[in-house]
């Protein structure tokens, strides 16, 4: 047995020669090739297939155990799951990484190269989708009965190319050459209705019955993606629905009323799951998006009910004991009226009984306060696509308004604020309101955010139902975000405190006592240096930029959004450049600013900021007067697998959103876990990170939420900062010249305009000076090697709170009320 001895109990133990034999078998029998012909892609597929044997066995055992125990389960509904690559994660979680490495080595194949062959499964935009992926990892690791439900997008988030400094979007085709992990389940195909009209009938007992005559029916085909828990015992699944034409077309409906208008006719069934909307934090407002949302919710509910009925028949009384559904933002909120429709129209339950079931099944997570991200659908659109659901929503609202009237008699203003229906030129359905009303628990994603949800977003709901609105601070899986992505640091930690920290991240606190130990400091910083070397090679390969690994690696990786303020970092970089030009002896430690960010394709200013970063980078990197001290690298196509390379190499983590705007952040947690020190505002989970690491180990700057509000209330004037601070004026004016865009003056002027003429909504100029000072502190701290090493170690040591296992424990104990269900052998 060559499987490494570890304190983590594992279910699968195979040795190197067995692994080798399995890979060869699949190379021959699954791929029809052989060792001499196989390229890395073939080796990747063969290795996946070798793993898949264990994975499938794990799924079978898990499902059998859950079935035999008739367990209560959580169903995580999310329009996005940003999974990244699966092979290295699955190898790690089965404890077979080293075995695979040795086995492939003997075959003359390099495992790292093989892992690089796997396309990222990028079925998400950013934090919201990655959170879902971390959560299902924790659920499986903690042996909890759980299933993720989402959409099997043919194209995930676009691939970003940079041409002439500008972002170009290219399609992402993650399944072009087949995906070895997914399992098609034709036996569980579902049908989903769309369009058409509602007929009102009177039953024999005088009961009004509604019958929806759909105009269109599409098929949902389930694909299961295995979710391997750490230790490989529980293997849950992520079930993703692909749409297909059903061949059903209601000619009666079409001929009699034209309910299917020309556009609806054109809605090809296959387009429903074709592509992920690439907008992060903006509602799409498009018909196809609503259809996507309904499509996956309807398929998933049918799937849940099918499974429930297998055990309980038509007895609905135990449904709420068996089923809890977590709505990841409002994207799946249409599931609420869909369940009501099934219960009232199909199962013929009384409204009150049905409503009681609904409001004990759904829980809702809010991820943002940004008004542009709060989904509202035109009532007319709902009426056309889901006519029965609109009726149900009106009924829910009608009954809810009565409840509001009891609490605030005659108060029409409060009714208007709380109504699911927003009156105006165009009647809109507020999905956030529907979600709060239809759920038994509502949570924000960090302490500050949850407080603001209560105070600003839903204050009356909090008064109406005290205790319903709560907080569950986000978390990240330490398996992917330390163990797998940073093997050198993981091994160092194993040696120091043992290897069970991936299951109990608070154990990292054991490192704190070594924070001032010279030898450990040296080892820790050596690992950082190695990781920086690897990233430097990546930067060279991708951008042909040479960077000095002794420089500070200052990393800002996240979606490009004004509220995240990449342009604040940019102004500061330009200021450093200017200081260096004015004074070649300007005293600063060499620094490399490294960015990764995708902009929504329709978000002009965000794309202009990417262009500006690249143009400024070009100038600085090629300016011999400064490029020994300053470099800028924008790595294209930021995605999970690139994050896994950038995060272990970061010295500084940029978390500089306007206070009150970033609900939580999770990149902040990943970077700190890997020993990066945060420069950040008092926003989202930064606040909780600061509480954990202590003020000496983080650089906090800028306006607080209260100060932001005060400044805005008193009439914020960005021009004041422009005239008052010569550096701000100089860099903003510089942006307008053709210095960075030779021959094209004004190419970057939209940024200046947004900050001055359009009011600088995110207070970039107001926070500039504080940010610049905090960066000087960073510079000073870094030069003190011992001080920095201590800070970095303490950051890693104090991240215990931010494991997604803790988030899941919070959900389980306070919201889902689930029991773990250890999977039996055999
Ligand atoms: C993001 C939030 O912006 C981010 O702060 C948070 O960490 C993440 O969700 C996970 O909770 N779309 N993306 C988000 O919110 C929305 C809406």
Image: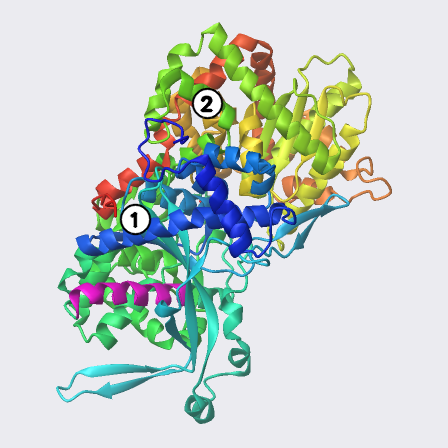
Residue shown at 39% from the left, 14% from the top: 512
Q: Which mark is residue 323?
A: none
Residue shown at 57% from the left, 26% from the top: 649
Q: Nearer the viewer, residue 583 or 102?
A: 102
Say whether mark 2 is within 8 Å of ligand 1.
Answer: no
Residue shown at 18% from the left, 87% from the top: 203
Number of numbered discs? 2
Residue extending furthest toward the right: 743
Label 1, on which residue? 442
Secondary element at tag 2: helix
Label 2, on which residue? 491
Secondary element at tag 1: strand
Main secondary-structure element of the magenta-colored stretch:
helix
| Distance in Å between CA atoms under marks 1 and 2 | 39 Å
Left/right placement of residue 81 relative to residue 352 reads right
Q: Nearer the viewer, residue 753 or 815?
A: 815
Residue 762, image x and y in percent? 55, 39
Residue 88 in view of the camera: yes
Residue 215, image x and y in percent? 42, 82
Asked if residue 631 is among those painted magenta in the image, a careful observer would answer no
* Above/below status of 253 relative to 337: below
* Above/below status of 621 relative to 794: below
Q: For the magenta stretch, what is the residue range?
A: 294-313
Residue 773, image x and y in percent? 59, 19
Residue shown at 54% from the left, 28% from the top: 648
* Above/below status of 645 relative to 258: above
Q: Are marks 1 and 2 in contact (CB under 8 Å)?
A: no
Q: Quadrant of ligand 1?
A: top left
How packed mark 2 is, by other alpha carbons closer than 10 Å (few <14, some 14-19, many 20 or more), is: some
């Amino acid at each position: 047995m060559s499987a490494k001895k570890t304190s983590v109990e594992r279910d699968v133990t195979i040795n190197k020669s067995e692994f080798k034999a399995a890979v060869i078998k699949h190379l021959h029998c699954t791929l029809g090739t052989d060792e001499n012909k196989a390229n890395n892609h073939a080796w990747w597929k063969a290795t996946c297939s070798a793993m898949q044997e264990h994975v499938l066995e794990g799924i079978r055992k898990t499902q059998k155990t859950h079935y035999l125990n008739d367990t209560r389960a959580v169903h995580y509904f999310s329009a996005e799951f940003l999974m990244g690559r699966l092979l290295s994660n699955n190898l790690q979680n089965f404890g077979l990484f080293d075995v695979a490495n040795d086995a492939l080595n003997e075959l003359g194949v390099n495992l790292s190269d093989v892992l690089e062959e796997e396309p990222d499964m990028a079925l998400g935009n950013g934090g919201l989708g990655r959170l879902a992926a971390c959560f299902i990892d924790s659920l499986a690791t903690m042996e909890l009965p759980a299933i993720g439900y989402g959409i099997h997008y043919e194209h995930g988030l676009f691939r970003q190319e940079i041409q002439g400094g500008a972002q170009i979007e290219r399609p992402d085709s993650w399944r072009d050459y087949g995906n070895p992990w997914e399992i098609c389940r034709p036996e569980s195909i579902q049908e989903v209705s769309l369009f058409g009209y509602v007929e009102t009938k009177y039953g024999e007992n005088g009961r009004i019955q509604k019958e929806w005559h759909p105009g269109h029916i599409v098929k949902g085909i389930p694909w299961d993606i295995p979710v391997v828990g750490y230790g490989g015992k529980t293997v849950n699944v992520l079930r993703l629905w692909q749409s297909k034409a059903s061949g059903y077309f209601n000619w009666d409906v079409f001929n009699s009323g034209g309910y299917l208008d020309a556009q609806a006719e054109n809605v090809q069934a296959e387009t429903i799951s074709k592509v992920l909307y690439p907008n992060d934090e903006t509602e799409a407002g498009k018909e196809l998006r609503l259809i996507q949302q309904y499509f996956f919710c309807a398929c998933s509910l049918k799937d849940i009910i099918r499974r429930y009925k297998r055990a309980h028949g038509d007895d609905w009384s135990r449904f709420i004991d068996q089923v809890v559904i977590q709505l990841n933002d409002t994207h799946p909120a249409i599931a609420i009226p869909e369940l009501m429709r099934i219960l009232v129209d199909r199962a013929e339950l009384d409204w009150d009984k049905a409503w009681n079931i609904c409001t004990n099944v759904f829980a809702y997570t809010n991820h943002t306060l940004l008004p542009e991200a709060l989904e509202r659908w035109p009532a007319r659109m709902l009426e056309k696509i889901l006519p029965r659901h609109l009726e149900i929503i009106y009924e829910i609202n009608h009954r809810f308004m009565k409840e509001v009237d009891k609490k605030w008699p005659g108060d029409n203003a409060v009714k208007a604020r709380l109504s699911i229906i927003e009156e105006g030129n165009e009647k809109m359905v507020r999905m956030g309101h529907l979600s709060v009303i239809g759920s038994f628990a509502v949570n924000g994603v960090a302490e500050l955010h949850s407080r603001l949800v209560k105070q600003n977003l839903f204050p009356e709901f909090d008064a109406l139902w005290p205790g319903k609105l709560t907080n569950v601070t986000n978390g990240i899986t330490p398996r992917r975000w330390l163990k797998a992505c940073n093997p050198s640091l993981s091994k160092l930690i194993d040696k120091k405190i043992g290897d069970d920290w991936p299951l109990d991240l608070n154990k990292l606190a054991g490192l704190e006592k070594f924070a001032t130990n010279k030898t450990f400091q040296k080892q820790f910083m050596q690992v950082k240096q190695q990781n920086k070397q690897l990233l430097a090679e990546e930067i060279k390969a991708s951008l042909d930029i040479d960077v000095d690994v002794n420089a500070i690696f200052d990393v800002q990786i996240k979606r490009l959004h004004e509220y995240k303020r990449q342009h604040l970092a940019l102004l500061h970089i330009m200021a450093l450049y200017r200081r260096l030009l004015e004074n070649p002896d300007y005293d600063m430690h060499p620094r490399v600013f490294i960015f990764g960010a995708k902009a929504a394709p329709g978000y002009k200013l965000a794309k202009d900021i990417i262009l500006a970063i690249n143009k400024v980078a070009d100038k600085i990197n090629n300016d011999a007067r400064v490029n020994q001290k300053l470099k800028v690298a924008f790595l294209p196509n930021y995605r999970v697998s690139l994050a896994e390379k950038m995060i272990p190499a970061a010295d500084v983590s940029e978390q500089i959103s306007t206070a009150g705007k970033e609900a939580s952040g999770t990149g902040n947690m990943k970077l700190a876990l890997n020993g990066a020190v945060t420069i950040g505002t008092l926003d989202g989970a930064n606040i909780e990170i600061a509480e954990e690491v202590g003020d000496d180990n983080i650089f906090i700057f800028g306006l607080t939420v209260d100060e932001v509000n005060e400044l805005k209330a008193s009439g914020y004037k960005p021009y004041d900062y422009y005239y008052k601070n010569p550096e701000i004026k100089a860099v903003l004016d510089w942006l307008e010249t053709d210095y960075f865009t030779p021959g094209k003056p004004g190419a970057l002027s939209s940024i200046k305009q947004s900050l001055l003429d359009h009011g600088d909504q995110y207070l970039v100029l107001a926070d500039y000076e504080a940010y610049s000072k905090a960066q000087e502190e960073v510079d000073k701290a870094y030069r003190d090697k011992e001080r920095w090493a201590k800070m970095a170690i303490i950051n890693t040591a104090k991240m215990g709170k931010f494991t997604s296992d803790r988030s899941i424990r919070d959900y389980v104990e306070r919201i889902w009320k689930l029991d773990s269900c250890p999977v039996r052998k055999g």
